Image (tube, rainbow, N blue to C red):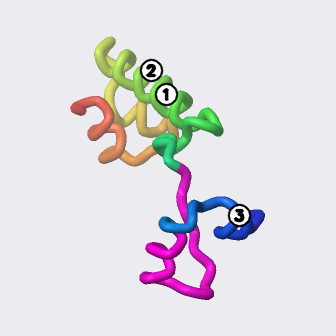
Amino acid sequence: MKYKKASDILPDELLREVQKYIEGEALYIPRGKARKKWGENSGGRSFFIQRNEEIRNKFFHKVPIEALSEEYSLSYETIRKIVYK
């Protein structure tokens, strides 16, 4: 992260107001944009959504939970949560 001098960026009155709360220390100001949800950048989210849809579809077509558990290497309880969600 690159540091910038507050006096170069902020108006004088705002700088004085900030100095009332913190003076001479580093201050992190987060981005104003909303954070992305988990897995949106890497594609993990879409992978798990697609996988869970496949599991629900197979369960709907009478594939037992035990077989799905073995096929996807997930516990019985995890498959159960996915199909009954």
Q: Amino acid at mark 2?
A: Glu
Q: Answer whether labels 2 and 1 touch (C-beta < 8 Å).
A: yes
CA separation in Å, label 3 and label 2 = 55 Å
Q: Answer whether labels 3 and 1 touch (C-beta < 8 Å).
A: no
Residue that carries the numbered disc 3 in the rendered image = 8
In reply to whether residue 10 is colored magenta, the answer given is: no
Q: Secondary structure at mark 3?
A: helix
CA separation in Å, label 2 and label 1 = 5 Å
- How packed mark 1 is, by other alpha carbons closer than 10 Å (few <14, some 14-19, many 20 or more), is some
Indicate which label's residue lies in the foreground, 3 or 2. Answer: 3
The residue at the point 50 percent across, 75 percent down is 16
CA separation in Å, label 3 and label 1 = 51 Å
Q: Amino acid at mark 1?
A: Arg
The residue at the point 49 percent across, 65 percent down is 14
Residue 51 - label: 1
Residue 61: image location, x then y, percent: 32, 12
Q: Amino acid at mark 3?
A: Asp
Q: Which residues are magenta?
A: 15-31
Residue 18: image location, x then y, percent: 48, 74
Q: Is residue 49 above or below residue 42?
A: above
Q: Is residue 77 above or below residue 28?
A: above
